[in-house]
Amino acid sequence: MKIVVVGATGTIGSALVYALQNDHEVIAVGNSRGDYQVDMTSEDSIRELMGSLGHFDSLAVTAGNVAFNSLQAMTSAEWQKGVDSKLMGQINLVRYALKALNENGSITLTSGIIAREPIPKGISACTVNGAVNHFVKAASLEMPRGIRINCVSPTVLKESSATYGDFFPGFIPVPASTVAQAYKKSIMGIQNGRIFEVD
Amino acid sequence: MKIVVVGATGTIGSALVYALQNDHEVIAVGNSRGDYQVDMTSEDSIRELMGSLGHFDSLAVTAGNVAFNSLQAMTSAEWQKGVDSKLMGQINLVRYALKALNENGSITLTSGIIAREPIPKGISACTVNGAVNHFVKAASLEMPRGIRINCVSPTVLKESSATYGDFFPGFIPVPASTVAQAYKKSIMGIQNGRIFEVD
């Protein structure tokens, strides 16, 4: 399979590339590194990326930013960050990927545990991850040509727990290599419209 | 109580005003009619509205637009409509209302049944309503000064079924007067972080 990983240079993305590269042709897309670059907050940049990639079998998005702050302190620009990147960035990648995906291909997006377990300063992450989960559920019912779409919703990563662990008291960190398996399940499985929770 | 209804001139909003007006001071806010006007897609307009209203006890938002189209046909402008209006419009109303609400006040937002029951052309409504539900769940854990926040998620209205009924096969329409009772429950009850489903 020809598999496009957007966010390939991140912690989850590089674990996913590692898990796929022996058996598949993996196209690594990053923000500034990788085989191709994309600014997922820009529809023009996404259109250009998809124009360069040609046809492929699978898209996995392991990228997308949100801002962390309290409801009362979060600025409009911080709200916009999550909406433009993790929400509309992923939706726009889906919209353009649908034209490039081969028959019976798949799309795998990323949400996160904060959708169901709110944490301090996680209001935007909860809102945006919830939106992504709902998008995937609805989109799965409209997929053309046998294409499937799922989402992986991971807890905090072992690799990130030194940096973010204090925000997640009582959460058991999971290694990125374990999270990567959920993307593999989505890519190689038959599921459609599933939110794969990894925690 | 002094209760602000944003969307007061709409079908649900006018039923809610009718249900409240004998016992409370109701401030009717519309897009072009009502006691005050607001463009909920504009943060400046929301800031101006809240500056004019002074302090109040309760905010109910029965307004917010989304576009209806298939995933493959929906344009960027159509996606933006739901994000700017029903999602960020409601979130921005909450952000500014928090500064104007009296102690032990309440906020009630509106999502909709499409969050849990996708329909053809309902991909943006599913995504945005899901986001609003998640926002309310997380926001309820950050409310200051005894303020509560809930959400009403109604099915298709009896009053709208001539216009929209064909999009909702098998859905039992509910009169706006019944939906209005869920807002009353949120405003006068003790619940916090609840999604009141009316269907």
Image: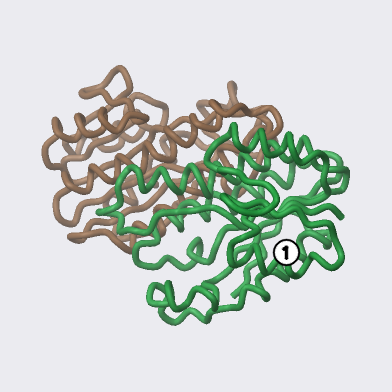
Chain colours: A green, B brown
* Quadrant assignment, res A111: bottom right
Q: Is residue B46 left or right of residue B111?
A: left
* Quadrant assignment, res B164: top right
Task: Pinpoint residue B98: horizontal percent, then vertical percent.
Answer: 22, 48
Please indicate, yes or no, whether residue A124 appears anywhere in the rendered image. yes
Task: Pinpoint residue B135: horizontal percent, then vertical percent.
Answer: 41, 52
Query: Mark 1, residues whose alpha carbon is within 10 Å: few (<14), some, or many (≥20)?
Result: many
* Quadrant assignment, res A110: bottom right
Where does label 1 land, which residue? A17
Q: Is residue A194 left or right of residue B45?
A: right
State the residue in front, B1 or A13: A13
Q: Which residue is at 52% across, 37% downward?
A: B174
Task: Pinpoint residue B103: horizontal percent, then vertical percent.
Answer: 14, 55
Picture layout, residue A1 above or below residue A101: below
Where's the N terminus of chain B, which quadrant? Answer: top left
Please indicate, yes or no, whether residue A149 appears anywhere in the rendered image. no
Q: Secondary structure at mark 1?
A: helix
Q: Is residue A178 left or right of residue B11?
A: right
Task: Pinpoint residue A92: horizontal percent, then vertical percent.
Answer: 62, 39
State the residue in front, A81 or B85: A81
Q: Is residue B138 left or right of residue A31?
A: left
Determine the chain carrying the residue at label 1. A
Q: Which residue is at 53% across, 66% downward?
A: A113
Q: Which amino acid, mark 1?
A: Val
Picture layout, residue B184 above or below residue A13: above
Q: Which residue is at 58% across, 37% downward?
A: B124
